[in-house]
Image: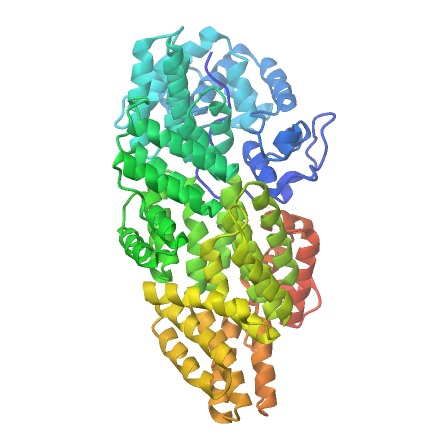
Amino acid sequence: MTSVNPPPLPHASPPQLPRAWQRVGTPLPEGVQQRPEGLPEGVRVRILRAAHGDARAAAELASVLTERQRAGLDPLPAQPSALLRSSRQEVRALPDGTRLLLLLAAADQYPVATHAFLRAVTAARLDTRPLDVADVAGLAHTTAGGLVFRDHWTRIAAYETASATDRRAVHQLLARVLRGEGESPRRSWHRGAAALGPSRRLAAELRVAAHTARGAGEHALACALVERAATLSPDPQERSRLLSRAAADAWRSGDGDRARRLAVYTHDEALSGLLALRAGDATDAFDALLTAAVRYASGDAAASHAPDAPAHLLARATEAAIYTGDLRRCREAAAVTDRLRLVPPGTLGGLAAAFEGRYDDARDVLKAAAGRCGPGGDPTLLIHSGIAALLLGDHTGAATAAVRAAAAAKARGEAATVPQAMEFRAYADFWTGRPRAAEAAALEALHQAYATGQDNGACHLQAALAMFAAITGDEDVCRERAEAARSYALERGLGLPAALALFALALLDLGAGRFAASAARLRALAGFGPGHGHRAIRHLATPLYVEAAVRTGDTRVARAAHADYDHWARTVRSADELALSARCDALLAGGDEAVEYYRTALDLHASGTRDFERARTELLFGGALRRLRRRTEARDRLHSALEAFEYFGAPRWAAEARGELRVLGESAATAEGAGDLAGLLTAQQLMVARMAAEGATNREIAARLALSPRTIDHHLRGVFARLGIRSRIELVRLLGEG
């Protein structure tokens, strides 16, 4: 009998959560809760994906989760047993001729879609009139393209309730008609599914077919083929190797739960390291990946692994080191690459050098890595190019590398890699003046990360979204996302998102004028060790720390932090980093001496890409000029800053700019009344407004955006206030006009 685990889903955005959890009028199996509560967002998204959007199946699966499954630590159940029992009973009640046709259609669609049903019916001269019975029963209906089942579970039941003899017969029939170009992998699938028992020959054929499918970017198909090859292989060691490969294919296709179910039957450090990197402890991931790299490089591994496997494993180990922010592990990985005479990923050597303060070495290595971002390259290497560019302050280069990484991943069918690329693109988009695009892309990537079982990446994206919320002044959203990210990150040793979440809270405090609280958080970032902080976020935080420290009058530690930051900025020669360093000089100098530093900073900003920071520099400069009674230039700077803050949707900094202008006797018109909703609302407010206008409840919107209903209520109140309306009816009208 062939495996009947649910097949991987198509590579698409995760389905909408709201109404799928409770479809009106749909009966649930006895004893199953109507609405699952208290589950982490990642688990809820994965349940709905495993349920193929079926509310009954989602509710049943949620009701039988173990504590570890509820926490997202173990893979989810593969099937809803109560629904399948019900579907089996319905199928068994059908006439034999109807059941045979349903079996043929089910074998053609599940778990590998082969699109050969009509050809098989014609070749076998089957009478299709018995399908009318299934249509009347509401189990399936015919279309011009073939047979459509009522749901996924009816299709499984149609296959499972048939005899082994009938299943083999339909697989043999389907294999005979699959003779077209490019159909050999699917023909091999049916040949393997029709096998009576173990067969080295068929196992070898399936391995070849999987290799072909993998090369075409069809990793879900490759997974099914290799998994079947493992079933047919008489060699236990070979079975373990094949299941490891099947798990890797499942992972690349975006089916993290299937990958974890398969991984249970293997002992592959590389696989366990990858899974831990994406949804486990980053330290464990690093150790497993480095161990696997050493084994593969020394030849103590399966010959089926690619020759460049050690380099790829080192790249993954580097990502684990980046997540932890652990200098010792960066050094350890760098030492291993030297010993094995491998070319290390540029980010590894660059991080190790930067963490040790060898900035000249770090600059050279990172620049070499950032330069490897040509189109059509390996997605992982492109992601590393983007990381290197970010570390160098080259946000345009980082965005280019991330976009190319996502495109390459999609072209190769590697759905799991897409949200990884988007993690780093979000920063680049924001700093280069595309705040709404950055927030929207980060939200989409968050759902993709959850759907593909990458909770570590989702944690990183939550922290990034907290940073965006800090800038847009959404205090509740910022705190909710930052606390969620920090809680998860500290449990798993993820120093990067833990530090970024703390940075977001410090930025929120700074924008709200809570300078002492902001300075305390930013000062703490400088002292955090592995798993709690990160050198890259320390650099990001230093200009803010200097500002907060100056406003509180305690600049002793801030001056030392700025000296290190200035050293880095002068070494990498990034216009933006140098501009921020000059702004720090201005803040620390004060008075007339600050003016030239501010002018230098703005000259450098003109050659950079961080428009938001340029606006903040103009705001600080405008305030300094006002205090020096240089009113005309102060007005120009403050108006320019105000315009940028309104574009970025940063109301608190816009309010500060207006306050400075009012002191100068200037009136500063707001953006309200402009008629452009996108110009009035933040990206998240606009999403909430659109979903509310479509009729979604606050709870449904909260589920979709991974926020609490209370936060959605806060967002809607903000939307109504900014648009000058009082009801959802007015919102529907406004959006309809827009």
Q: Quadrant of the C terminus?
A: bottom right
Residue 239, placed above or below residue 655: above
190 horizontally vs 649: left or right: left
Residue sitting nearer the eye, 198 or 628: 628
Mark count:
0
Q: How is the image coloured?
A: rainbow
Q: Percent position (x, y) of residue 641?
A: 49, 78
* Residue 26 horizontal/vertical position (percent): 68, 34
Is residue 433 in view?
Answer: no
Tell me: residue 357, above or below residue 234: below
Q: Position of residue 42 (x, y in %)?
A: 58, 40
Could you say which is closer to the camera, residue 632 or residue 164? 632
Vertical position of residue 619 compared to residue 217: above or below: below
> Going 59% across and 72% down the picture, which residue do you hit?
554
Locate residue 485, reporting x and y percent.
Answer: 58, 49
The part of the image, by quadrant, that contains residue 301 is top left
Which residue is at 62% across, 49% downward?
484
Q: In this view, does 369 lie above or below 614?
A: above
What residue is shown at x 62% (from left), y 21% (from top)? 81
Report the side of 359 relative to 619 (left or right).
left
Residue 41: tell me if it is visible: yes
522 with respect to 317 (left or right): right
Along the line of sight, the residue nearer the viewer: 695 or 274: 274
Q: In which quarter of the image is residue 307?
A: top left
In this rendered view, identify the residue nearer to me: 734 or 465.
465
